[in-house]
Image (cartoon, rainbow, N blue to C red):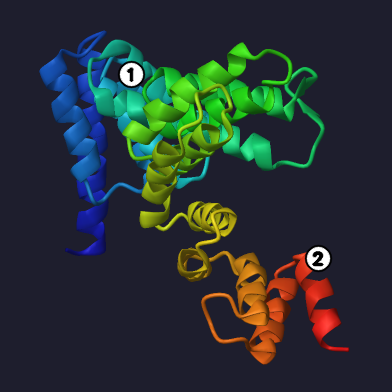
Amino acid sequence: MAKWEKGKMKKFFVCIFAILFCACSQLTPTQADNLTKSIRDNQELSNAEKIKAYAKACSKNAFSSCYELGNLFILKQDPKRASKYYKIACDNTKYEIYCLALGSAYTQIGKNYDKTHWKKRFSGERNSDVALRFFTQACDVGDQEGCFFVAKNYQNLSFKNKEYLNLANKLYQKACDSDIFAACRELGVNYLQGNGLEIDPQKSIFLISKSCENKDAHGCYLLSQVFQYTKDYEKERLFLELAIKFGDKTAYNNLGVLYEEGKSVPKDTIRAKEFYGIACDAGMQKACQNYKRLNQ
């Protein structure tokens, strides 16, 4: 298509949008869906032009356009503005996907505030308080990752109120049931240590194994600790190797201990020293001390 024809086609769609907007104060559901589809499928419009078109459609109760507008703001890495439009779509329809998108946006906002090094934002609120507020909003609209972060916050505050542990464990269970495997791991730890739950080693191992099976390095490392405690060094080594495979280089320290002491493997101080060095480079101070000791 010639350049002038593309420009003409773009102006044609803009005119169609303008006619629809002026013709009625609010769009019917069918008009709204058709308009959203027309904007979404029009390859001649830039994202900036689509944002304007979706915003106008959203103001006319085209809630699918509100959702698409939220998606564009997510692409622009602006979850706060995305959440504004996802919320309109979620509050005015029965589509679960709109509310889940809202939850994911709130979760991303919460993570952003968790990561910042600044002490205060939003009228003096601490970052942890702001993050918890967004995580809670995410959880309330069905985002299970948000529920996981709320549970973590409740557990961190359990020294103030033991009831927080009960709330944390309920949310861990809810998130675990939705395949948030880090939640399975944390719930397993609480069953192992009796944190708000009756101690149940078998259930603990089952839950932590679930996280390890889904490539959660920390879950694999925790299982290695369980088998270290029970002196099953073969299984300890197996789960250390899985933790390393999934990205936990500090697990090399404990693997080095097994090689140094000849537990489940032939004694090999050269390999032990090598493993200590890798864990030391990953920032584990104890591994640095072990390396220095073998290097003397």
Q: Secondary structure at mark 1?
A: helix
| Quarter occupied by residue 122 | top right
Foreground residue, 182 or 126? 182
Residue on which the image places disc 1: 90
Question: Is residue 116 depicted above or below 286 in this figure?
Answer: above
Which residue sits at x=82%, y=32%? 119
Examine the rendering and report whether any part of residue 95 can be seen.
yes
Nearest to N terminus: mark 1 or mark 2: 1
Q: Label 1: few (<14), some or many (≥20) within 10 Å?
A: many
Residue 143 place in picture, x, y as percent = 39, 29
Determine the residue located farthest toward the left in the rendered image: 30
Tell me the quadrant of the picture where the C terminus can be found: bottom right
Which residue position is annotated with label 2?
285
SS label for mark 2: helix
Tag 1: residue type? Answer: Cys
Say above or below: 101 vs 256: above
Q: Is residue 197 left or right of residue 1?
A: right
Residue at horizontal 40%, vertical 40%? 202
Residue that lies at the very extreme toward the bottom in this rendered image: 270
Residue 262, numbered circle? none
The quarter of the image holding the N terminus is bottom left
The picture places residue 131, in percent across and down from the top left corner, at: 63, 28
Foreground residue among 93 and 243: 243
- Residue 75: where, in percent of width, then height? 43, 46
